[in-house]
Amino acid sequence: MAPGIERLAAPKVLEGAFAAYRLAQGKVTARVLGSLKPDGSTAEEVAKANGALLAVNGGFFFVKDNGVLHPTGLLIVGGAKQTGLKKCRACTGILFSDTKGLHIVRPAAFAYRKDIGSALQVGPMLVEAGRPLPFNADGPDAPRTAVCLSGEAIIVVVAIRPMTLHDLATLMLAKPEEGGFACNDALNLDGGSSSQLAAELPGNMERLGFSARVQNFIAFFPR
C-alpha cells in the first residue's frame, strides 16, 4: 500500500468486517496521539490533521461532567506525560515507542525515559512472549481493536464483527498459514463502539468501524 505497509487478508469468517495491516518498523514509526478537541475526535479526523498513513483508536477513557474526555491509565503524547500509571483490571499492558521502535510490556516492566515519545496503558494483554493469555472461550464478544509485534513488524487489526478475547488472542497468535498473524506480544485496545480505523494510503482510503469520538489514538507515519 505504501513503503513498509501491507494490507493483510481477513479470516473468512470476518470478511467485510475486518481489517489488518502489517507495518515494517524500519520504514514506519508509531505515535500515540491525543484527540483534536476536548470532547474527542475520530480516527479519520486525527489521521487527516496529522498526516498519518494509518490511525486506529487507542486506550480507555471516561467522560467528565463537563463533557471532556479523560484517559484511563498512562498516556504520553509527544514526550509529555498527560496521565500516570493506573491499577485497573484491564490495564495490563503498555504500548510505548522510543528511538528503536514500538514495544509492548507489562506495567511493572515500564520505566519512563527521555527517549520515550509515546506511551499508552490499556489491555488486556492477549499474547505474551509467544503464548496466549487465558480467556474464557465463551466470554463476551464485542468489536475489537488490537496491536501486536510480529518479528520486526507491527500488526494492527480492527474487527467490527464481534469477537471474544479468546478468539482474538487465538487469531493474533496463529501462524499465517493458519490464518493468523504470528504475534509474539499482542495487546487489546479499547473496543466496542470505539473501534475504528482510517487509512490514508495511495490508492486506499479505507474507513472501517464506528464514528464515536474517542480520546486517544495510535497512528503510523513514514520513518
Image (spheres, helix red, strand yellow):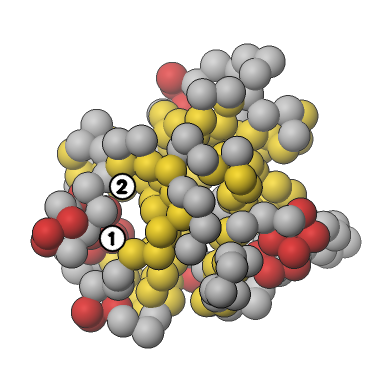
Q: Residue placed at 24% from the left, 73% from the top? A: 11
What x and y, as percent, mark residue 39? 81, 63
In the image, which disc is placed on residue 126?
2
If you read the primary sequence from the N terminus, does the residue marked by circle 1 or circle 2 appear first?
A: 2
Q: Secondary structure at mark 1?
A: helix
Q: How busy is the neighbourhood of tag 2: few (under 14 within 10 Å), some, or many (20 plus)?
A: many
Work out whether residue 199 or residue 143 is closer to the camera in this orientation and state it: 199
Q: CA distance from mark 1 to mark 2?
A: 8 Å
Left of 29 or right of it: where is 44? right
| Amino acid type, callout 2 | Leu
Residue 89 seen in the figure: no
What x and y, as percent, mark residue 63? 74, 60
Work out whether residue 65 or residue 79 is closer to the camera in this orientation and state it: 79
Answer above or below: position of 164 versus 76: below
Q: Secondary structure at mark 2?
A: strand
Answer above or below: position of 64 versus 104: below
Q: Which quarter of the picture shows residue 55?
A: bottom right
In the image, which disc is placed on residue 179?
none
Which quarter of the image is occupied by the C terminus?
A: top right
| Amino acid type, callout 1 | Leu
